Image (cartoon, rainbow, N blue to C red):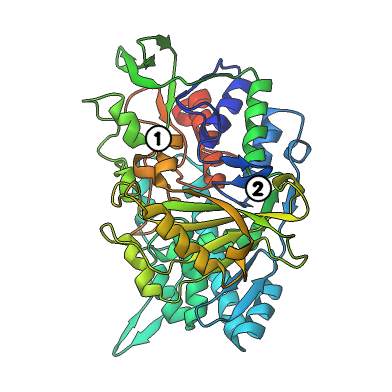
Amino acid sequence: MIGAGMGAMAAAARLAVAGQRVVVYERAETYGGAVRRFERDGFGFDTGPGLLTLPAVWRDLFIKTGREPLEECVELVQVDPSSRHVFADGTEVALPNASRAGVVAALDEALGAGAGGRWGDFLVRAREAWDRTRRPLLEEPLWPNWPVLAAREPYPAVPHKRLLRTRRATTLAEVGAWELRDSRLAALLESYALAYGLDPRVTPASAAVLPYMEHAFGTWYVRGGIRELARAVYERCLARKVEFVFGAEVTGVLEKDGRAAGVELSGGTVAEADAVVGTGPWRLGGLMPGRKLYGAQDVEPGAEGLHPGRVVVCLGLRGAREPDAVHRTVVHSPDAAEELSLFGPGTMPERPTVRIDRPDDPALRPTEEHEAVVLTATVPSGTVYDWTAPGAADTFADRMVAAAERAIPELRERTMWREVRTPVHTERETGAEGGAVPPPSLASPSGTLHPSNSTAIPGLFTAGGWSHPGGGLPHAGMSGALVAGLIVEGPEFRGSQ
């Protein structure tokens, strides 16, 4: 197995339980892929995902791989409110966790009568899109007849009369403009796309499933940080006798009699295997130059580096966290159109949308008189923007801090020090081209699908965010389940039950 990311470890644990001997070769010195932690002076910071949705995916992994359920290995805490939003006009709203009635009431109070109802009606339509796509998109392998996922838009858009024509929204931006009819509700909707590096102007309306997942299944925090989930999965792998070799870079995939037969490591060492599980299809192709990994009917891998990445600013603050502080706050850009310049060729927004994580977790701060805060913004990857240029990282971090001060007054005065992490760090830690972050797969005529977990080469498979069903912690766990099923049961595997 190539790489010790979350999807790969999920596959490894399941394969080991099925009686397979599994060896994981990881080029870095630790596990978890993008699920990392930065530590300094007694502070701890999640530098990847800060919250968890759809914890059932990881509960299923722990149930299927041992007697100890997930909750005995980590402490899951439901975050309430799920998020606070500060909009461009200064309006603020805190959204209750997993409560449609509570969200409707909060939006009506903050944005005016009718706003909550429009959002609530949108969530009902989003549920229909979820019900239509959940199993074929997330729980089953991407079969050769995958075009059925692109046959029609699964989101049941409301007819919209414009001039003499009646149209239905096909993009997330059109859903916001035509169905939500409030710039703040539109910003709320589009922030879910931006968090995954998706341009709402071209992202299909089926991306409505992203806010629906948070609404329906809640938002969760892992005590000690999301890195604790990676630790628990790693320890579950060890308990099932999965072997890990860190600092081992795979330089090639061996082929024998037309099928994958092992890997070659830097230095020339060869490790034979009956099956090989790789990471991103884009990188996997580089390990087998001249070989076509996918057939004519499959989704071809796109260039990883053309997707956006993230800048993460870790702030060590003096002063105690306010008792009523919210775990996650989203400060929306005052110029939504200008912010979308990040999807252009090498341009950078002056006033980005910034996500602020302020976990109430003593494990992440040296004393009660300190606070650990993480700021995150979506940015162009290192492929299209030079993050190594002098001052590039700090200049953008200054913009993020300025935005965050709209939610946390005196943030700069409280800052003892900061650590700025750009797509350069992501590329170094995960190997992703340009430090890009994979988006989730979406079903629609204009949707984003990732290549299948199986390839045209027998015995060669892929797991993780750059293959089916795409990026995000829930999706990574699903990819591991799909790969394990394909290896153990073969082509007749029809998905998790």
Q: What residue is at 68 percent from the left and 53 percent from the top?
A: 220
Q: What residue is at 60 percent from the left and 26 percent from the top?
A: 13
Q: What residue is at 53 percent from the left and 29 percent from the top?
A: 484
Q: Amino acid at mark 2?
A: Pro
**Residue furthest left as drawn:** 290
Q: Which mark is residue 440?
A: none
Residue 194 or residue 89, whichever sits in front: 89
> Residue 56, image x and y in percent?
66, 46
- Looking at the rendered structure, the secondary structure element under dot 1 is loop
11 relative position to 76: left or right: left
Seen in the picture, residue 424 relative to 374 is either above or below; the reply is above
Kindly tell me whether residue 158 is visible in this rendering.
no
Kindly tell me whether residue 424 is visible in this rendering.
yes
Q: Residues within 10 Å of mark 2 (few under 14, many from 20)?
A: some
Q: Which quadrant does the C terminus fall into?
A: top right
- Looking at the rendered structure, the secondary structure element under dot 2 is loop
Q: Which residue is mark 2?
A: 55
Seen in the picture, residue 303 relative to 88 is either above or below; the reply is above
Distance Cα–Cα, label 1 vs label 2: 26 Å
Q: Which mark is residue 431?
A: 1
Q: Nearer the viewer, mark 1 or mark 2?
A: 1
> Residue 92, image x and y in percent?
61, 78
Q: Amino acid at mark 1?
A: Gly
